Amino acid sequence: MASLPFVRVALLVSFSVLLTVLLGFGLPALLNAVAKCCGFPETSVTECIVGVYFIFVLYVATPRIPRGSIEVKGKSVFITGCDSGFGHATAKHLHKLGFTVFAGCLFKDKGERGSKELEEMQSDRMKVVQLDVCSEEQVNRAVEYVNSHLDDSQRGLWGAVVNNAGVSTFGEVEFTTMETYRQVSEVNLWGVIRVTKALLPLVRRAKGRVVNLASMYGRMGNALRSPYCVSKYGVEAFSDCLRYEMKAWGVKVSVIEPGNFIVATGILTRDIVATTADKLWREAPPGVQEDYGHAHFDRHMAMMRSYCSSGQKDVQPVLDDITDAITSHRPFTRYNPMEPHWWIRMQVMTHLPAVIADRLYF
């Protein structure tokens, strides 16, 4: 069996060839026919197609154009989910760049490895805070701590509210309990809203940044991932609404939409799959168990196990995008740190008719 990277490359090349053929032969013929009916010369249509295609290639191939950077010295950021994964890596990365970092950790009080590692840096610019994003009391205490530790020279918190706390789960809709939907949304969505709202006064004072971590699944759905997709769609909508409202205050809001970083973050392991699968089957209504059957269920669980060793191993693309969103004078609204095939899939599913996307991917 061909290796997964080879299969991905082959699929990308095939898709590119198919798209090129369609654009090169089908689209010009169609547009030329329309142009002839409207009385326009055929050559202008061809020139327009070449021009649009050239701009598209430049957009995809050109490296990000520098847009100026803010002065880091004396600025503070608040980051949630710093026990592990993106949050932990972001805290260390932004500290290295010169920011004062308020690192919210769920397990600080328990002295677990992630928070302990940050505390052992023994830096006056790394301040570890106990934070459960589901707890209004802990969020308020964290905000009070931040406010009391900002220097007099700082106008406020340099709006970098980077929300990295999150949980992932899976399972078909009929196997997923309402409690699971509630738990996932409580962390992934309500936690983001709760922390952001609490810190907004400090962020507005600094005319700074809000950077929310969503997912590519905040832009497109997928089978077996409905609780996660629902919560991430919510983060996208909340961030859009906040961006419109904060424009008058000079606060810029960005969304980071990572692709598959399962290996890099360890958010999904074989043990997690096994435990979740057992719970899903055990709690499913008898009628659902009978209708779907164990063979169908096991096939889907095997597919989830195969994802455990997939994805990018280096979180640096995510860190680069978070950094740009925080430090650039003109940050982007959305960032897409993901592999090419996921980027293509997201564009297909968000821009082409659903009937085409469904046929290609499901």
Image (tube, rainbow, N blue to C red):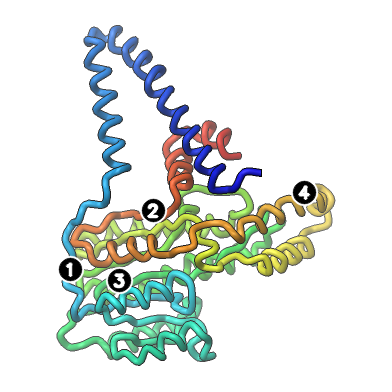
Amino acid at dot 1: Ile
CB under 8 Å between discs 2 and 4: no
Residue highlighted by disc 4 = 296
Q: Quadrant of residue 315?
A: bottom left
**Label 2 neighbour load within 10 Å: few <14, some 14-19, many 20+:** some
Tell me the SS state at disc 2.
loop
Numbered mark located on residue 79 in the image: none
**Residue visible at 18% across and 82% down?**
154
Amino acid at dot 3: Ala
Q: Position of residue 319 (x, y in %)?
A: 36, 66
Q: Position of residue 350 (x, y in %)?
A: 44, 41
- Distance between mark 3 and mark 1 Cα atoms: 12 Å
- Distance between mark 2 and mark 1 Cα atoms: 22 Å
Residue highlighted by disc 2 = 336
Of the numbered discs 3 and 2, the one sitting upstream in the chain is 3
Left or right side of 303 for 258: left
Residue highlighted by disc 3 = 160
